[in-house]
Image: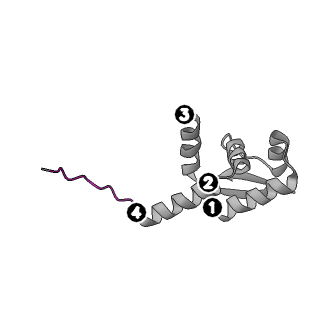
Amino acid sequence: MATKRLVRTVNPELLRRAAEIIKLLGHPERLKIVEVLESGEATVSDIQEQLGMAQAIVSQHLAKLRGAGVVAARREGVHVFYQLTEEKVHHILRCIRTCDM
């Protein structure tokens, strides 16, 4: 007699959001950027200096991350500070660091 498997179902909206974030983080430069932001707020210049990326590239990636709600920005004078707002990113980075490849 075959045993019946319990199928776990995930809310379709949650799956859609997870797929959006995973797709967005599928770029190595964006992963590096969110890794910098994992330790706290940073400006484009801060990220550029830490990663050795061109300012325009960092800004383009941040615009995509911001558009998807993964990061948020706040202005303080002439500086714009970015921070992670999507908790899933912390879990994804932790998994990348700890999962055997």
User: Circle 2 sits on which residue?
Assistant: 85
Marks 3 and 1, Cα distance to the nearest angstrom? Answer: 25 Å
Whether residue 72 appears in magenta in the rendering, the answer is no
Residue 76 in view (yes/no): no
- The residue that appears at 80% across and 41% down in the rendered structure is 51
User: Circle 4 sits on which residue?
Assistant: 11
Q: x, y percentage for residue 93?
A: 59, 42
Q: Report the disc number at residue 77.
A: none
**Amino acid type for the residue under numbered disc 3:** Thr
Q: Nearer the viewer, mark 4 or mark 1?
A: 4
Left or right for 99, reference 5: right
**Amino acid type for the residue under numbered disc 1:** Gly
Q: x, y percentage for residue 75?
A: 78, 58
Graded by Cα atoms within 10 Å as few (under 14), some (14 to 19) or many (20 or more), the crowding at tag 4 reads: few
- As helix, strand or loop, the secondary structure at mark 4 comes to loop
User: Circle 3 sits on which residue?
Assistant: 98
Q: To which quarter of the image does residue 63 belong?
A: bottom right
- Seen from the viewer's position, the closer of residues 73 and 25 is 25
